[in-house]
Amino acid sequence: MSAPVTSPLLVIKDIECRYDGREAVRGLSAHVNAGDIVCLLGPSGCGKTTVLRAVAGFHNLDAGEIRIQGVLVSRAGFTLPPERRSLGMVFQDHALFPHLSVAHNVGFGLRREGRTEKAQIVSEVLELVGLADMAERYPHELSGGQQQRVALARALAPRPDLILMDEPFSSLDVEMRERLSAEVRNILKTRGTTAVLVTHDQHEAFALGDLVGVMHEGRILQWDTPYNLYHEPSCRFVADFIGQGVFLPGTLLAPDTVETEIGVYKGNRAYTWSKGTRIEVLLRPDDIVPDSGSALQAVIVQRAFKGAEILYTLQLPSGGRLLSLFPSHADHRPGERVGIRVQADHLVAFPISS
């Protein structure tokens, strides 16, 4: 007997959104399965927050439709109010009530529950987010990370079908942002909560997301796992936007083989361009490894210490440059010549436009 086919929890189909006649989102489609955490990632002005606002019911659609749990919630000329969508929202500025305790902030949206049930729910979610001992404190007595966990607890308390998070960690320092991203992912996965996060920070998107949609000019260019976005970008913009790397000019010798100034190598994909096509090859810092015995030499021009690794900018004899991550056991200095080799399992190349 075959397993039953389940519908996605959230379906976004060919939506368009405008501001004062200006197109902000165009022909965008995506779906989110129950229990998944997905991220919309892109530079400022790409339309990611507009998509989130449309899902929340704060922005009307000019075309297309949005369904949550199979129910039509938005189309051109119709927008179901936000409070009827079974959504939880977590904002950048926490939006906590300063005059209410943590417990009362978390329980604010539990209007239908009796006093005993409400207290139990509040206790459970505060335990889940690690703030059980802070129920009687007030927002000003908490750190920024603690305030954001209270905001998450408040969003989780009514057990919504979907949690929407709009740049929730951008006001926090880098260390707190990284730690809280991991904590929030664990909390959402423990609860089995479906979530959509909007962010411009790819480290945050990769830490949280099962799937990430890279947006540009109102469209999703690639909807994929963090691993595939990094190693198998579908277009030049995604390759440039995700991670670090440089493009070296080269020539296609065979569908899976390229020649560049640093040698000939085969990758894991076959291209359909004709032999001899001029291309540019993406090389990530982890594709270039140190090799003291290599005939290929480069000169260090910059270095950035990262603890376990050092990111070096290397200049090739031709004047071209590469990035490479070396283990930090050896401390090479600018001007020093080092041996390197290419260790790239993923071949990422794009034709050079004439």
Image (tube, rainbow, N blue to C red):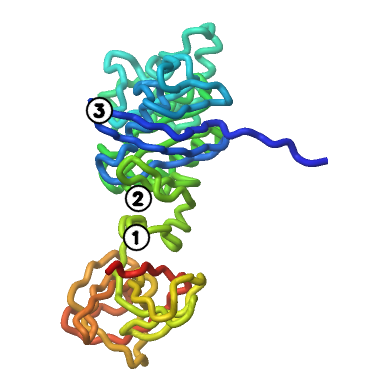
Q: Position of residue 288 (x, y in %)?
A: 36, 76
- Of discs 1 and 2, which sits in the foreground? 1
Q: Which circle's residue, 1 or 2, is located before the other in the chain?
A: 2
Tag on residue 21? Answer: 3
Q: Residues within 10 Å of mark 1 (few under 14, many from 20)?
A: some
Quarter assignment of residue 232: bottom left
Number of numbered discs on residues: 3
Q: Give me the residue at 52% from left, 37% from top.
A: 32
Amino acid type at circle 3 is Gly
Tag 1 near tag 3, CB within 8 Å? no
Q: Which residue position holds label 2?
A: 202
Q: Nearer the viewer, residue 337 or 274?
A: 274
Q: Residue at x 55, y 12 (%)?
A: 117
User: In the displayed structure, would residue 228 be above or below residue 23?
Assistant: below
> To which residue does mark 1 refer?
236
| Position of residue 348 in the picture relative to residue 280 (left or right) | right
| Residue at image point 21% right, 85% down | 318
Which residue does the image show at 45% across and 29% down from the upper left? Answer: 64
3D distance between C-alphas at marks 1 and 3:
29 Å
> Dividing the image into 4 quarters, which one contains the C terminus?
bottom left
In this rendering, does residue 107 appear at all? no
Q: Amino acid at mark 1?
A: Arg
